[in-house]
Each structure stands twice: as structure tokens, then as C-alpha cells.
Image: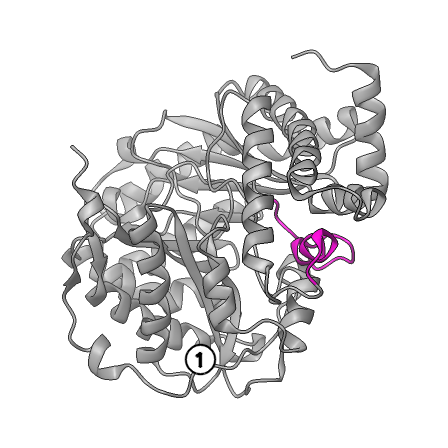
């Protein structure tokens, strides 16, 4: 890939002034050849394989940071959904999680994802044990992340699984009460989960992937924001879209360069570049502020969904032209706590839960890092998740929920998570319930559009 001197200088400016970075490099590792019904043997084989592929990951990324001058924020590992390779009980899964957490810390990995299951059509006995173990796995271990695919356009929505997981979300929050329920920030509930997603907490190594691959997540909200500040309001929406496409192209080229070089040095396959604009709590690194520069007064105002759709479309089109391996979620995240502008919009009541839900129909993930009142019931949490899953299933797109009922706090108060997870105002939840709906259980059938053969 040829990079001109002009592009190099422009990239240096983006790094120094506009917060361009590689948000995550995620090493995906298959554990199928480690499968074993004996817990100790499974742990031994799995940990050996994680060391084999992961021992040089951190040092390689540090070398690339120095050589290219491009910050690499997180190093992560994603493994095969654990329920597919180890049929354990509750205690087994807790022990495996502790061992994997130990390995991640030894390898200096920020997060390890894949304590996951694909339960869109039903829940096996071992998957039920994994769900039961969730509150302990997430609260006891620093690096371990979990995800569950509970719905797909092909299969419909497993309402039983949604309700069961919602009850465990409540328990995980209670077990991490002193950290404002932070254990729940490491759990994602998906519809149509992608198998090559490098972003936590939803990353896992897909069943159709090679033995080990490297996926890249590039972040550039600050770059887009800075460009829009210079452009002002003199361009039409289609002209503005073209400018965003050009920026996405440049950002993606740099991401792919780093990803391919890292994979080459590690001796593994390069996977995908995820084009998603991933914000941080830092000033100026906000998707909400991009929407406001496009022209809405505050994120959540009328026009916000249309502005977000235009942004996501432009990012995807520009990035697709720059890379032959685009995947993951690719678009724009709107996490409340991780985006300073989004958190402010919620705090000022410009943005509510219902408007966030509407905007997830066009963003790249869903209801992300939403702090809920601590007394929100498991049934209401299940109802919120079911609504979000319905958007994904009906529109044949990936969507997800990362919901945090904050123990002891009410709407209007703030939850503090720290670091990249930031802080969030606790959002108001509709006080009318959905118990009778949720407790019916069963499967919400797939839509007619699922019959595509």
C-alpha cells in the first residue's frame, strides 16, 4: 500500500491535533482444537494457545506505535464462544474465567472477550450454566468480557434467553455496586452479531475464521469533527457527505496499514478493519458533537436520526473504498457514557431513551453504555432489550444492548465508570411495565424477510 508524503503529514496532524488513533487491535484465537470435557485439560490447552499467539502482541504494537507515531489504545484477545468448546457447569466457567483473566494480565491484554454463546433459537444445558455464572465471571475478573446473540433475522428473538440474561444483569450490577454496576459494562446482548468484531465487550472469534487473525478498530471522531468545524455551514448535505467520505478513506488506509503490518510481524492472518467511529470521554472526540456540527442544535433534537444516518453511510462508503477487508460493526457508536457530548445531551434532556432507541436503527451497534436507575426491574430491562432486538431483526442489521442498572441511584444522578468507559447521567425509564409480555416467554418468530433462499 503506497502512502504519499502529503498523506503522512496530514496523518501526523490528525494524530497530534485531532485525536486519531487505532482504538483497538484484537487478536482472534480459535479454541476448537482445545475443546475438552475435562476442565483442567481445556484450561491447559487453551492457555498454551493464547500464550503461543499472544505473547508478542503487546510488544509488537508498542514497536508499531514508535515507528508510525500512531497511538494504539487497546490490545485485546477474542476467543471462540466458550460454550461451543467447553460444556461446563457454573463452577467450571468461573474457574476458566479466572485462568483466562490471569493469562490476559500476563500478556498485558486490556480485555479478553468470548465468554459468549449463540442462543437465538434455544439454550443448551451448558449455556444455561454459563448464563448463571455471568454475574460472578464479570464481577470477579478484570479483563473478561461476555456477549450473547439472542436474536437473528433468520431465527427471530429468543425471549426466554433475554429474560434470563436480564435477571443476571441485575445480579452483576449488585455484585459490583461499589463501582456503580460496572460489571454490566462487560456484557453485550446482540441481534445478528458479527463474527469479526474487534470492539469489546462484544468481540468473539467466529466459527468461520482462521486459527488466528488480527482485526483492527480505527477511531476518528475528532478528525471528522475538526474538518466539519473548518467547513462550517456553506455546504449542502450531499456535499458534506462527500467530505466525510474522503476523511473516512484516509483514516481507514492508515488503519489497514497498521493492521497488515502487525499481522505480518505476528505471523498470522489479517482479518478486517472495523470502520466505526468510536468516541471517548475526551473533549472533542465525540459523535454527538459531529451531529451538532452537521446542524442539529443538540443530539436528540429533530433531525438527529437523519444526520446520524448520513454520517454512518458516508463513513462506510469512504472506508470501503480504502480497504479490501472491511467488517465488524462499521459505522458510528453512540455510547452514552463513552461520549462526552452524548452524556451531556442526556443530562440536558435533549436525548431520552426512546430517541436513543430510534437512532440505533441507523447506527452501528445499539443502546450502548446506558445507565439505568438501580430499581429498574429485570422485566423492564428485558423489555428494553427485546425492543432493540426487534429493530435488528426487522431491519436485518446488527444491534445490541449494554445496559447498566446502577444500584442505589436514580434518574438524573450520575454513574462514574472511569477511563474510556467515562461517566453517564442515569436515564429516565418509562414507568409503565411489561411484565405480562416478558413472562410469556418463548420465541418471537422471524419476520417474513428471513425467507431469502
Q: Quadrant of the C terminus?
A: top left
* Residue 165 visible in the current orientation: yes
* Residue 19 visible in the current orientation: no
Residue 282 sits inside the magenta stretch: yes
- Report x, y in % for residue 60: 64, 28
Residue 300 sits inside the magenta stretch: no
Vertical comparison of 269 with 370: above or below:
above
Residue at 29% of width from left, 34% of height from top? 207
Q: Is residue 129 left or right of residue 50?
A: left
Residue at 78% of width from left, 54% of height from top? 284
- Report x, y in % for residue 378: 33, 79
Instruction: Give residue 304's quadrant in the image.
Output: bottom right
Residue at 46% of width from left, 62% of height from top? 358
Residue at 54% of width from left, 57% of height from top? 305
**Which span of residues is magenta-colored?**
277-296
Residue 101 or residue 177, whichever sits in front:
177
- Report x, y in % for residue 56: 58, 29
Q: Find numbered disc 1 in the image and state the secondary structure of the residue it sits on.
A: helix
Instruction: Give residue 352's quadrant in the image.
Output: bottom right
Residue 382 or residue 179, whichever sits in front:
382
Q: Is residue 182 left or right of residue 227?
A: left
Q: Is residue 101 left or right of residue 154?
A: right
- Report x, y in % for residue 268: 48, 21
Residue 363 or residue 417, whichever sits in front:
363
Q: Quadrant of the N terminus?
A: top right
Majority secondary structure of magenta residues = loop
In the picture of the structure, the residue carrying the numbered disc 1 is 174
Amino acid at each position: 500500500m503506497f502512502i504519499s508524503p502529503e498523506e503522512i503529514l496530514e496523518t501526523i496532524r490528525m494524530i497530534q491535533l485531532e485525536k486519531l488513533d487505532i482504538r483497538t487491535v484484537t487478536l482472534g484465537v480459535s479454541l476448537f482444537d482445545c475443546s475438552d470435557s475435562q476442565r483442567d485439560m481445556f484450561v491447559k490447552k487453551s492457555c498454551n494457545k493464547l500464550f503461543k499467539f499472544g505473547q508478542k502482541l503487546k510488544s509488537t504494537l508498542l514497536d508499531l506505535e514508535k515507528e508510525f507515531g500512531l497511538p494504539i489504545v487497546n490490545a485485546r484477545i477474542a476467543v471462540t464462544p466458550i460454550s461451543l468448546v467447553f460444556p461446563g457447569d457454573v463452577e467450571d466457567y468461573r474457574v476458566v474465567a479466572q485462568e483466562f483473566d490471569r493469562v490476559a494480565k500476563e500478556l498485558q491484554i486490556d480485555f479478553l472477550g468470548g465468554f459468549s454463546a449463540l442462543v437465538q433459537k434455544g439454550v443448551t444445558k451448558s449455556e444455561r450454566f454459563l448464563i448463571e455464572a455471568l454475574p460472578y465471571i464479570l464481577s470477579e475478573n478484570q479483563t473478561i468480557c461476555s456477549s450473547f446473540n439472542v436474536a437473528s433475522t433468520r431465527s427471530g428473538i429468543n425471549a426466554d434467553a433475554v429474560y434470563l440474561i436480564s435477571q443476571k444483569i441485575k445480579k452483576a450490577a449488585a455484585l459490583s455496586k461499589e463501582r456503580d454496576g460496572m460489571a454490566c459494562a462487560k456484557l453485550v446482548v446482540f441481534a445478528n452479531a458479527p463474527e469479526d468484531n474487534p470492539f469489546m465487550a462484544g468481540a468473539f472469534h467466529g466459527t468461520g475464521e482462521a486459527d488466528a487473525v488480527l482485526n483492527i478498530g480505527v477511531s476518528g471522531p475528532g478528525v471528522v469533527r475538526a474538518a466539519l468545524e473548518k467547513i462550517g455551514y456553506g455546504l449542502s448535505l450531499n456535499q458534506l457527505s462527500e467530505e466525510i467520505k474522503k476523511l473516512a478513506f484516509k483514516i481507514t488506509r492508515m488503519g489497514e496499514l497498521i493492521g497488515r503490518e502487525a499481522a505480518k510481524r505476528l505471523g498470522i492472518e489479517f482479518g478486517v478493519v472495523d470502520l466505526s467511529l468510536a468516541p471517548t470521554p475526551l473533549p472533542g472526540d465525540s459523535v454527538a458533537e459531529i451531529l451538532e456540527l452537521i446542524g442539529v442544535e443538540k443530539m436528540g433534537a429533530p433531525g438527529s436520526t437523519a444526520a446520524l444516518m448520513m454520517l454512518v453511510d458516508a463513513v462506510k462508503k469512504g472506508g470501503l473504498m480504502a480497504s479490501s477487508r472491511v467488517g465488524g460493526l462499521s459505522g458510528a457508536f453512540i455510547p452514552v457514557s463513552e461520549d462526552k457530548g452524548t452524556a451531556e445531551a442526556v443530562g440536558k434532556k435533549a436525548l431520552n431513551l426512546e430517541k436513543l432507541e430510534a437512532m440505533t436503527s441507523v447506527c452501528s451497534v445499539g443502546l450502548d453504555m446506558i445507565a439505568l436507575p438501580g430499581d429498574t426491574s429485570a422485566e423492564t430491562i428485558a423489555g428494553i432489550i427485546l425492543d432493540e432486538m426487534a429493530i435488528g431483526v426487522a431491519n436485518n442489521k446488527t444491534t445490541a444492548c449494554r445496559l447498566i442498572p446502577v444500584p442505589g441511584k436514580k434518574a438524573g444522578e450520575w454513574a462514574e465508570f472511569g477511563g474510556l468507559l467515562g461517566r453517564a447521567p442515569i436515564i429516565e425509564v418509562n414507568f409503565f411495565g411489561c411484565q405480562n409480555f416478558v413472562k410469556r416467554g418463548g420465541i418471537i418468530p422471524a419476520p417474513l424477510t428471513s425467507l431469502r433462499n
